[in-house]
């Protein structure tokens, strides 16, 4: 999968490739930090799964409504 992303970047200007790679690294860092905070505050796998299912359902219904 990652190879496909690199192929997509191959057609971009060098400076845009750098920007997108930096952005991906920043997003990974944000996700990691958020997960660390969640875990430190006592978050559990069960609760994460429950909330993810809820948000996925609400998001899908909202996209369907808007479409």
Image (cartoon, rainbow, N blue to C red):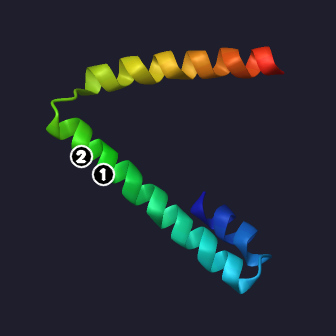
Q: Find residue 45 and report its horizontal and vertical position in percent.
A: 27, 27
In the figure, is residue 10 to the left or right of 30?
right
Q: Counting other residues with Cα less than 10 Å from the Cα at mark 1, is it few (<14), some (14-19), or many (20 or more)? A: few
Residue ranking furthest to the right: 67
How much space separates mark 1 and mark 2, taking CA atoms?
5 Å
Q: Where residue 16 is drawn, which disc sits there?
A: none
Q: Which mark is residue 36?
A: 2
Q: Is residue 65 above or below residue 1?
A: above
Q: Residue at x 77, y 76 (%)?
A: 12
Q: How many marks?
A: 2
* Image position of 39 (left or right of 50): left
Q: How dense is the environment of label 2, judged by Cα within 10 Å: few (below 14), some, or many (20 and up)?
A: few
Q: Residue at x 74, y 77 (%)?
A: 10
Q: Residue visible at 76% across and 82% down? A: 13
In the picture, residue 8 is in which quadrant? bottom right
For the residue labelled by badge 2, is the local secondary structure a helix, a strand or a loop?
helix
The percent position of residue 21, horizontal first and vertical second, equals 56, 71
The answer to whether marks 1 and 2 mark residues whose Cβ atoms lie closer than 8 Å is yes
Quarter of the image with the N terminus in it: bottom right
**Residue 28, position as x, y percentages in the image:** 43, 57
Residue 26 vs 51, above or below: the answer is: below
Above or below 64: residue 23: below
Side of 26 where 11 appears, left or right:
right
Residue extending farthest to the bottom is 14
Q: Quadrant of the C terminus?
A: top right
Judging from the image, what secondary structure is the residue with disc 1 in? helix
Q: Is residue 50 above or below residue 3?
A: above
Q: Position of residue 19 (x, y in %)?
A: 61, 74
Judged left or right of residue 63, residue 40 is left
Write the residue at 53% across / 71% down.
22
According to the picture, the residue beneath numbered tag 1 turns out to be 33
């Amino acid at each position: 999968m990652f190879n496909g992303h690199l192929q997509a970047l191959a057609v971009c200007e060098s400076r845009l490739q750098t920007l997108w790679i930096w952005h991906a690294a920043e997003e990974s860092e944000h996700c990691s930090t958020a997960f660390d905070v969640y875990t430190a505050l006592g978050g559990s796998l069960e609760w994460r799964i429950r909330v993810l299912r809820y948000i996925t359902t609400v998001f899908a219904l909202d996209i369907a409504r808007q479409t």
